[in-house]
Amino acid sequence: MIVLVVNMHACVTYSHVGDWYMTSAIEPSMAAKVPFIVWQSMLQSFFMGLLFFLAGYFAAGSLARRGPGGFARERLFRLGLPALLYMLVIHPFILLGLDPWDYDFGPRAAWYAHYLSSGHFLGSSGPLWFAVALLLFSLALAARESALGTSRSTPASAAPAASPAGKRLLGFALLLGLGSFAVRLVQPIGTNLLNLQLCFFVQYIAWFAAGVHAARHGWLLPLAASRQARVAGWLALIGGPLALLALLAVGMQYAPKEAFFGGWHWPAFGLAVWEQLTGLGLALGALALFSRQLNADTAEWRWLGDRSFAVYVLHAPVLVALAMLFRKLPYHLYSLVALLTLVGLVISYVLADLARRLLGLRAIL
């Protein structure tokens, strides 16, 4: 998932599809954008939702071990501090230190003082919006458990349950599609509240809650091993792009592109439903693939896994700096995206390893 996050931001840099710190000086033609629209839409449909699902799955065990109070304190430390590190150090560094736009910010000290005093830093979490949102979800979960006063078994002691049936999963996705459409009536795609894109939060909240439920009832492994997970993955992988292209082809003939982003428009409804159906299928397929083909605890996998969150925190300035450097290279759209992704991942992992060696950073990265 972290690799896909880095790739998404590398794609935005050159495709001009989506928002990122900087985009290339050359905007691709619509024909060149179409593969990016499909690829980035496929990623958006599932990769952050799956991260919230996994976070909820592991949150259940931590909550059971620590109790609501201890869990809340641990989440404030492990999620709140990285978010503050990004807002107070990394984001200003990208603006003032890298400054890919050659913008005159004036006296740096005065700008930074205003950045803090005005509260602008609260909406400057960049990719760390995920940590902010996950912290809010975790605190809400802790408050709920504290109010209920119930004790929960850990995932290890939970008796495995049958995985959700296909009809139930389909109904779940359709409900999320309806919910996303409803939210986008007031928060269309492209809007945010303190850097939180609420247009996607119906999925994030539901998948986080599903992760907690999966841990407590022991149905994650049966689901990942099920035939329906593999079938759903293939259907989404093959049918998802075809359905999206058909929706775009028809929708663009009868409605402006803004009609896909939200409001009482059938393209917005179609995109919301497509997103949830495809996203659930891709997530199930990813779980099936990794549980069957890549479920090995090797030193290499552990090294990568231990540094994945640090890569998430640190990759933004790496991609921006590299994109500035790559301005001198010949323009070839897809080659530049691949180069930025690969080099960005390598350097981000190296920086993550170095950062985790520093006293104070290892505990939060």
Image: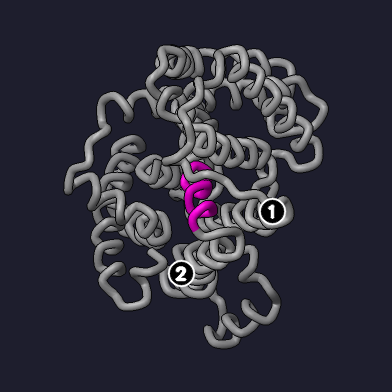
Is 74 located above or below residue 307 in the figure?
A: below
Residue at left offset 53%, top offset 70%: 84
Q: Which residue is mark 2?
A: 90
Res. 277 image quadrant: top right
Colour scheme of the rendered structure: one colour
In this view of the protein, can residue 21 be seen by the observer?
no
Q: Nearer the viewer, residue 187 or 336?
A: 187
Q: Which residues are magenta?
A: 56-65
Mark nearest the camera among 2 and 1 is 1
The structure residue drawn at horizontal position 69% and vertical position 45%, both measured from the top left corner, is 198
Q: Is residue 164 visible?
A: yes
Is 300 positioned to the left or the right of 236 in the image?
A: left
Q: Quadrant of the C terminus?
A: bottom left
Tell me the quadrant of the picture where the N terminus can be found. top left
**Label 2 to label 1: alpha-carbon separation:** 40 Å
Q: Describe the element under mark 2 as helix, strand or loop.
A: helix
Residue 55 horizontal/vertical position (percent)? 49, 46
Q: Residue beneath label 1, please?
A: 149
Q: Circle 1: is it few (<14), some (14-19), or many (20+) Cα within 10 Å? A: few
Say if 76 sits above or below 110 in the image: above
Answer above or below: position of 13 versus 280: below
Magenta stretch mostly in which secondary structure? helix
Towards the viewer: 353 or 4: 353
Which residue corresponds to the image point at 50% horizontal and 25% vertical from the top-left? 161
Counting residues from the start of the chain, the first of labels 2 and 1 encountered is: 2
The relative height of residue 246 versus residue 161 in the rendered view (above or below) is above
